Image (cartoon, rainbow, N blue to C red):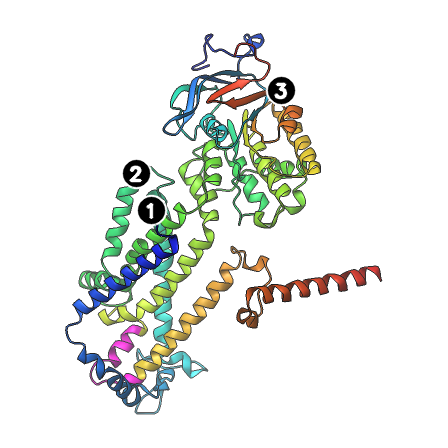
Amino acid sequence: MIPINKKLILVGFTLLLLAWLSLDDLVEDWSQVESAPEKLEKFFTEDLWPPDWSVLEAEVWADGSLHKPNGDMCNEDIELFCSKAWTGMVITIKMAFVSTLVGFIISVPLASLAAGNLTPLPIAIPARVLLAGLRSLPSIIWALLFAIAIGFGPLPGILAMTLYTIGYLGKLQYEAMEGIPNAPLESAMAMGLTHSERLVHVVIPESSNHLLSQLLFMFEYNVRHGTVLGLVGAGGIGMYIDNYVNPPFAYARAFALLIVVFVVVVIIDLISMFIRSFVTEEGDVRRPKWWTVLLPAGVAADYYNKLSKGKKSSKSIQESE
Amino acid sequence: MAGADGSSKSADAAHDDEPEALVLQDLSVGYKDPLISNINKKIMPGELIAILGPSGIGKTTLLRTIAGLIRPLSGKVSHDYPTRSGIGYIPQRLGLIRHSTVRSNISIGARSRCSKFYPAFFPLSRELKNDVKSAMKSLNIDDIADEPVRILSGGQQRRVAIARTLIQKPRIILADEFLGELDKENVKSIITATKKVVDEIGATLIMVEHHEERAMKLADRIWRIEDNKLIEEGDSNQ
C-alpha cells in the first residue's frame, strides 16, 4: 500500500502535469514569450513611467481659472478635491458602496435559502440556480445591458454591480453558512425557532467573521471593478482611465490613476482588518513579534515563555511590595 | 396525550393516573441501522433521568430523536408540549454562538417564548429582557453579561448554555454531557443552580452522563444502554 505522502505527491504531480499540458495546448507559439520582457520594459519606461500626477490637480482653463472635470468652477480650498482622481474615486466609491450594501441585503436571505443546513433541497437548489445565473454574466455585461436600457452614467453601473454582488456574495455566504457548527443550529431547532429567527440570531452571528470579511472584500472588489465599468460609460474613475488608454493615449496619467485605486484598495483592506478584529480571536492572543517568524518554532516558544515568566515575576514582586 | 396508550411497558406503573411528560413508544433510533431498539418508556413531569453507556452506543442519537432533530427509525415520541420552547436541548458542544455576548446567547432562548409571527429582527419585550437579566443572576453570570462567549471558561460557558435553556421555560430539558469534565466545585454549583430553576419550572431533565457515580447521585432514574437495548436500573419488567 502506498503511504499517504506518496499519494499526495503523485496527485500533486499529476495536477501540475495536466496544467502544463493544458497550457501547452492553448499556447501555439512560445517564441512570442521570448521578446515579452523587452516589450514590457519599453512600454513601462517610455509610456508609463513616471506617472503623470496632474490627475491630482484641477483643470486649468485658458483664462487661468480652476475647474472640476465636469466643468464646474473649483471653489475648494484644496485643489485635490477638484481633480479627476478625487472626483472619479468619490463617484466609484459611492457606486461601490450602494451596490455592495444593497447586494448584501438581498444576498443574505437568498443565501440562507440556498444553504443546505438551513433549507431542504427543493428550496436550496432553485436558490442556488438563481445565484449562479446572476454571477454567470460578468458585471461588465450587466452594465452593457443596463446602459442599453437606461443610458450611460453611474446608475447602470450601480445596477450591474448590485446584481453581480448578489450572485457572487450569495455563493460565498451560503458556503460560509453551511460551514457553521451544527450544535447552535440544533439547539435553535429544538427550541422551535423559525427560519428567519435562526438566520438572524444564530447563523449570521456565528458566521459573522466570514460574512464581514466577504462584505468588505466585495466592497473592495466593486471599487476595483468600478474602474472596469467606466469602460462602458458607467462613470467614476474608470471612465477617466478609459479616456487615457484610448487615443490620444496618456498612459502615464492612467498609471497615476491606477496607483490611486491601489492606495484606496489598501486603505479598505486596513479598515476591513480593523472591523473584523471585533469578531475574530486575533485580539485574544498575543501578536507575535515580526522577527520571531524567522526563528524555529521551539526557539520562538522559549522566548515567549521567558517573557511571560518575567512579567509574572515582576507582577508578584509588585504585589509582595 | 397523542401517541400515549396503556400498552407502554414503563417501569413507573405507579404513575399511570398522572399525565406523562413524555412517552417513548416502540421507539427505535439510529441512522441507517438501529442503535437502540424497542424503547417503551413513560417519563413523568419533574423526573431527572440519567442515560449511561459507552461512547458511540447511541445516547446522543436517542436525545436528538427525542428533541425532534432526527426521525425515529420506527415507533414514536409523544408529548403534549408546544414545539416552540417546549423542549430545551443542550448539545455536547453546548451550541453557543462564540462571537456573541452572554446576553445575546441567552436572549436566543428567550426568543422562543415570543410568538412565531414576531419578527426576528425586532427586539425582545421588556419582560423577556428582565427575565434574561434574572436568569443571568441566578446562574452568577450577570457580571460577564457583555463578554463574548469565546473568552469564557468551560464552567462559565456551561452556565450560559443552561441559562439559555432554562429561560425558555421548557417542559423537557435534554442535556448531552453538559457537565463534561468540570471540576467538583463547578459541577456542584452548576447542579445546584440548575436544580433550583428546574424545580421552579417543574421540568423533566434527561441527561447523558459519562460519570456513573455522578449520575447515581443526581438522577431519579438511570437508563443504561447495552446491546442495542435501553435497560432501566431497578426495573424488574426488563
Q: Which amino acid does label 3 sit on?
A: Asp
Residue placed under numbered mark 3 in the picture: B220
Q: In which quarter of the image is residue B234?
A: top right
Any part of residue A86 in sight: no
Circle 3 — which element?
Answer: loop
The residue sitting at 25% across, 79% down in the picture is: A243
CA gap between label 3 and label 2 equals 43 Å
Picture coordinates of residue A234, whole percent (x, y): 26, 68
The amino acid on which the numbered mark 2 sits, given as a three-letter code, is Leu
Q: State the image coordinates of residue A163 (x, y, percent, origin top left).
A: 28, 56
Q: In this view, does A198 lie to the left or right of B196?
A: left
Horizontal relation, residue A106 to residue B171: left or right:
left
Q: Does the magenta stretch include residue B137?
A: no
What chain does badge 3 belong to? B
Label 1 chain ID: A
**Cα separation between marks 1 and 2:** 14 Å
Q: Is residue A85 visible?
A: yes
In this picture, residue B191 sits left or right of residue A195 = right
Q: Is residue A300 depicted above or below B201 in this figure?
A: below
Is the residue marked by circle 1 packed among few (<14), some (14-19), or many (20+) residues within 10 Å? many
Range of magenta residues? A238-252
Q: Name the residue under label 1.
A: A110
Classified by dominant secondary structure, the portion drawn in magenta counts as: helix
Residue located beneath label 2 in the image: A121
Above-or-below relation of A224 to B140: below
B74 to A160, vertically: above or below: above
Percent position of residue A184, x then y: 49, 40
What kind of element bears circle 1? helix
The Cα atoms of the two marked residues, 1 and 3, are separated by 48 Å
